[in-house]
Image (cartoon, rainbow, N blue to C red):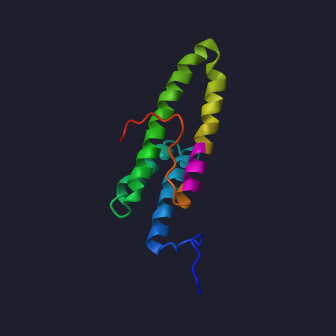
C-alpha cells in the first residue's frame, strides 16, 4: 500500500498534550471575564509551569504575554482618549479584540500553529 505525500502524519500523544496546553494558554485570557485579574495571571502561570515540560509553550507564552502587555498599554491610551470622545469606540474595539484574538490563538494552537497577535508590541523576545 502506497502512502501518498498528502497524507497527514499522525500526532504523537505528547505533541497533542502540548497543543492542548498551548490552546489552554491562549484561552485562559478569557478567564478574566469570570474572575477579575485571573485572565492576566492564569496565562503566565500556565506558561511558566509548563514550558519546561513542553518547549513549544515558551513561544506561545511569549506571544500571549506580549499581547496582554500591549492590550494594557492600548487600554491606558484609550482611557486617556476618552477625554476627546474617540476613546469610547476604541475601547469597544479593544474589548472585542480581547475576546476574538485569544479564541483565534487557541484554535491555531490546537492545530499546531503559532499565531502572533496582530498589533502586538514585542516586548518579550
From the viewer's perspective, tell me whether residue 97 is left or right of residue 50: right
Look at the magenta stretch and give its main secondary structure: helix
Q: Nearer the viewer, residue 80 or 103?
A: 103
Name which residue lies at 47% across and 45% down: 64
Name which residue lies at 57% across and 71% down: 5
Q: Which residues are magenta?
A: 101-108
Looking at the image, is 96 positioned above or below residue 27?
Answer: above
Quadrant in the picture for residue 98: top right
Name which residue lies at 45% across and 64% down: 18
**Is residue 66 in view?**
yes
The residue positioned farthest toward the left in the image shown: 52
Q: Nearer the viewer, residue 66 or 35?
A: 66
Looking at the image, is 15 positioned above or below residue 96?
Answer: below
From the viewer's perspective, tell me whether residue 89 is left or right of residue 45: right
- Residue 28, horizontal then vertical, whole percent: 52, 51
Q: Is residue 103 magenta?
A: yes
Amino acid at each position: 500500500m502506497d502512502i501518498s505525500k498528502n497524507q497527514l502524519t499522525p500526532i504523537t500523544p505528547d505533541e497533542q498534550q502540548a497543543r492542548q496546553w498551548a490552546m489552554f494558554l491562549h484561552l485562559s485570557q478569557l478567564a478574566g471575564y469570570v474572575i477579575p485579574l485571573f485572565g492576566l495571571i492564569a496565562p503566565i502561570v500556565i506558561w511558566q509551569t509548563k514550558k519546561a515540560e513542553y518547549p513549544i509553550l515558551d513561544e506561545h507564552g511569549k506571544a500571549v504575554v506580549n499581547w496582554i502587555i500591549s492590550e494594557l498599554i492600548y487600554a491606558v491610551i484609550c482611557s486617556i482618549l476618552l477625554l476627546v470622545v474617540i476613546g469610547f469606540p476604541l475601547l469597544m474595539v479593544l474589548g472585542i479584540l480581547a475576546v476574538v484574538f485569544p479564541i483565534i490563538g487557541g484554535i491555531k494552537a490546537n492545530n499546531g500553529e503559532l499565531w502572533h497577535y496582530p498589533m502586538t508590541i514585542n516586548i518579550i523576545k
